[in-house]
Amino acid sequence: MAEPATVAASSAGRDAAPDSAPIAAVASALSGRASPPRPSLNQIYALPAPIRTFPLPAFYPNNPISLLHLTYAWLSQVFRPPPREPSVIHVGVWDPETRSVHVRDPTSIRALWEQGFYGKGSLSRSEPNWLKRELARRGSPEGKTVSEARTEQRREERRLAKWERAKAELEAIEKQRLAEAASHAAAAELSKSVPLGESFIKKRDGRVAERRSDLEASDLARSPPAAQPVSESPPELGLDAPVSATEIENKEHFQLAPEEAFFLVFSLGALRVVDPVTSSPISTEHLLSLFRAYSHFPPRPHGSRLGPDDPFLVNYAVYHHFRSLGWVPRHGIKFGVDWILYQRGPVFDHSEFGIMVMPTFSDPAWEGHEHDAPRRSWSWLMGVNRVLSHVLKSLVLVYVDIPSPPVFDEQMRRGGIAAALKKYTIREIMVRRFSVNRNR
């Protein structure tokens, strides 16, 4: 069997990102060339992990032809076995300052993002697209309108819509006041015998006219503020001399969280982490100790005692649990939670659940060992739940029952981290906010 190649090989035919590219489309239209059709999102993100599988076709008892198809596929894999997976092993560099693994090879970056949505760009919100934004900002046809630019455009549209709505409300109020003043004036004409009412109407008409002049001179009566362009070229470059991707240094690198990096190394074997000083590969056992030590603050010195309740082990157990069930977990610090869960990935849908990791120590053997029990209050729970409800997400409390140190050490001696992870028990509890009107 062919050995895996260390390097950075590409996800075939996936250089095109799912973002729209109006600048490139305009440039192609002006040059008289039609832009090539873009692949669909299902084609770009076809692989849910950086490995390929070769399943046998299904067998249907009521269809004899399916048995022939199954037999042919099985014999084909027996006499001509598929290549060993993972066929590509990507290389990352451990960075102790940011406590993450950095990947700089462009093909490896695209492969890790498009095959499972691992990591994030250091200068981007999630997908590494700083170079595309920079090219679009400088007016290059190679630039693309990315998600950050579209988000800024939607915010500008919402701001203008709010301004128009406020102006329409003020105009409606002013029309109502003028109509009331006209009705009062008509009533005053009918009751001229009452001087008090006439003077009152005159005063009221004067106040309405003064209010109307103030409204016309106010900021809201003027023309709406000009929309800020989402991306524009700097004055020193201009659009007359667009640049290409080869002329711009890509200052962005790819960051993998410790949980993501260890999952790729330990579970899939699709990543190799090297030492930043010696550039030598770090073994799985040493990488586990490194991640466990750096999960504490400050980092534990080399050779110190590490327990089964290390923050890295607890969070990795949750990450491994949801990844193995087909979910796409990503860090949820933006929403005040530990993880957020996607069904397919950020480019397909929004995350529906926010995960809070809750360590528990139910084993009686923990009474003789020092450990930090989590301290959570009802005010903390209501605050997190309120934040998630505002962004249309549900809060899920994930309770991780941690094995005692003797049990954990025994399993590490017998079967390593694979056997020790089986002793972690995970339970999920969804928290929902009760509303009297909605839940009646």
Image (cartoon, rainbow, N blue to C red):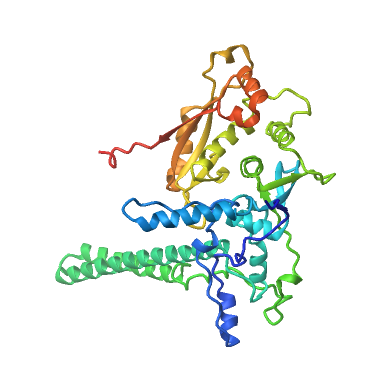
229 or 87: nearer the eye?
87
Query: Residue 305, percent across and down?
Result: 72, 22
Query: Residue 134, percent across and down?
Result: 67, 67
The residue under the point 54% across, 41% down is 339
> Please, which residue is most extreme toward the top here?
368
Is 100 on the left-hand or right-hand side of 356?
right
Is 10 on the left-hand or right-hand side of 423?
right
Q: How many marks?
A: 0
303 to 214, vertically: above or below: above
Is 355 on the left-hand or right-hand side of 102?
left
342 to 311, vertically: above or below: below
19 to 270, vertically: above or below: below
359 or 10: nearer the eye?
10
The residue under the point 17% across, 65% down is 194
From where the camera sits, is residue 345 visible? Answer: no
From where the camera sits, is residue 398 visible? Answer: yes
> Please, which residue is most extreme toward the bottom here?
32
Query: Where's the C terminus, which quadrant?
Result: top left
Query: Residue 148, percent across and down?
Result: 57, 61
- Using the rendered view, name the quadrant where residue 65 is placed: bottom left
- Using the rendered view, name the quadrant where residue 232 is placed: bottom right
161 or 342: nearer the eye?
342
Is 8 on the left-hand or right-hand side of 59?
right
290 to 187, vertically: above or below: above
Query: Residue 210, percent across and down?
Result: 38, 68
